[in-house]
Amino acid sequence: MDTITQELIKVSTRRLHSFNKVFKLSLITIVATSSQLKANDLDVEGKVTTTGYVYQTKTGSEEPETNKVATITPTVTATYSSRRMNMSAYAEHIKVEQISGNVDADKTYTEFAVDGLTTLIDNALTLSISGKENYRVINQEQDYVSDKILAAGDLTKFNNVAAALNFVTPNPEYVGLSIQTSYSETTTEESIEGDFGVDGSNIGLSAAISEGRKVDSLSFNLSASYNDTTRASFQNFSSTEVSAEVGLPFNQNVSFLAQGYSSKYDVDTTGFATRTNLDSTSYGAGVMWQPMNERSISVTYNQLDEGENTTNYIGLDIAWALSSRTALNFNYGKRFYGDAYTMDFSHNLKFYRSSVNYSEQVTSFSRLSFGEGGTSLFVCPIGSVDLGECFQPDSLSYELQAGEEFRASTDIETDISEEIILRKAGSFNIGYDKRRLKTALTLSYGETEYLESGQLQSTRSARVVIAYELGKKTDVNFSTRYARTKPRGSNDTDNTLTSSLDVSRIVAQHLKLNLGAQLLDRSSDSADRDIADKRITLGLTYTF
């Protein structure tokens, strides 16, 4: 046990050396400013999983091919928790051995994730760090098709490290201030542009000022954000967004409202395929009805200036907390691409939780990689893949503890690319957790416009995950996903269905037996892209 754990820690340590200086300095700062480290606050767990696969694959019009694969995956998880600091680390090393004529069939992969949050000043100043290395598909149309067993050549190594410093004035009386600074780096070995990968960094700064609790004569909210992103294969680009809103009360519930918004992108658009202007400015006035705190509706008449074009429109903003468990935020306006919407709805009951989210943003793959995360429907142990190990939090504002992460309901549905993108993404999520049954349903939509090449990519998907506890020692997990994808720069449509059924049983104190079956079927308008894959798996997991 000690020898294996030490070897796993050595593997994690070697990988951590690839982190940049900013990440290392952040880690040092967290340790230096936290309270005394205590051994009983540190929890380390190791496990080894061995799995055998028998699978049959049919591609296009070719004859089916049957193969056998064996994998061994040692894993180590470490968590540390104290009054001022929470940290977690997860690392696994995957060795794949398969009988195949392909000389590249046998591969090894090392993946890890590190997250840390420390409180420098109670209720005011926090410092967070994160780092991860894993393998992703280069081309999004291969998502849920290519993995470490099948078509591993479509994967590339992905690395992201980040640090953020957050300040907020606690319970402000007259003026509230919040400031966030961040730095992140994203690299991949390959990208959709060719053998060279993404190599970008981003510096971010945002600030917001609002009225305090003792200010009754007016309301105001001023915010600004700045991001500067480097790109190895394209020109660097920066973005600045500024918004302001001031309200003067007519009476107890109604206020006169004036607002403005500006977005500027410091990038040369002369070479863009379709859009030659990304900058826009809007301003207007209207009324806000606010019958109580956390419930308001605003209607404004606005003018949008986009280059030489001017457009008048009516804007709508809703921030409505129906209860402590249900909240709705909705905004409609206009930007350079036309109508602009954002929506965030969440509803939470004892056993049931649902959410609806929609957003639109000009961004890039490296920026998305820094901000990616899951929904708050389920909280899972870091590195977990089984819904049965997760639970639903008891509030909409649940704060993750050491060793926890939100389960991702949707994926980053973009290619690994350095292009600037206009991304529109929405999802509808339902989660249920009661006694032995846990289930999650996700309907998602994603559309990505690659602004420099003018290419479009879209994905619509539905996913169902079910976990059922047959007994104290036996669990069943089932998942299925259907996706309809239009690949980048193509009029073809891919329809992909993936399903899996897994049964696990504890056969000894630290030993678990796993039996599973998987099915993949992709049909495309291009017959040579059709693929079918069937698998049966048998595995053992030993936990230390």
Image (cartoon, rainbow, N blue to C red):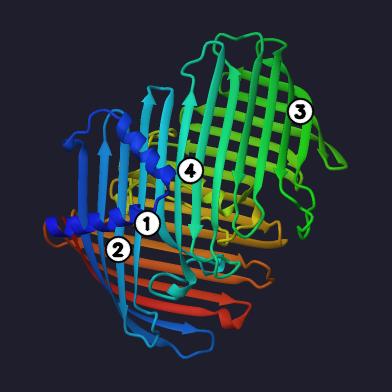
Could you tell me the amino acid type at mark 4?
Ser
Q: Quadrant of residue 238?
A: top right
Q: How far apart are marks 3 and 1 (CA)?
A: 45 Å
Task: Using a 10 Å C-alpha cutoff, classify the residue at mark 3 as few (fewer than 14 neighbours), some (14 to 19) or many (20 or more).
Answer: many
From the top left corner, tell me how far across and down residue 456 is, in percent.
Answer: 68, 62
Other residues around mark 4 within 10 Å, as few (<14) / some (14–19) / many (≥20): many
x and y percentages locating residue 66 in the rendered image: 37, 86
Closer to the chain start, of discs 3 and 4, is 3
Q: Nearer the viewer, mark 2 or mark 3?
A: 2
Q: Do the residues labelled 4 and 1 touch (CB within 8 Å)?
A: no
Looking at the image, is 78 positioned above or below residue 470? above
Mark closer to the observer (3, 4):
3
Q: Give the residue at mark 1.
A: 466
Distance (Cα) linking label 1 and label 2: 28 Å
- Mark 2 or mark 3: name the one nearer the start of the chain: 2
Q: Which of marks 4 and 1 is nearer the N terminus?
A: 4
Residue placed at 57% from the left, 54% from the top? 365
Query: Where is the C terminus found, in terms of image quarters?
Result: bottom left
Amino acid on which the number 2 mark rests in the picture: His
Q: Name the residue under label 2.
A: 93
> Tags 3 and 1 in contact by the CB under 8 Å rule?
no
- The circle on residue 300 is 3
Residue hosting label 4 = 354
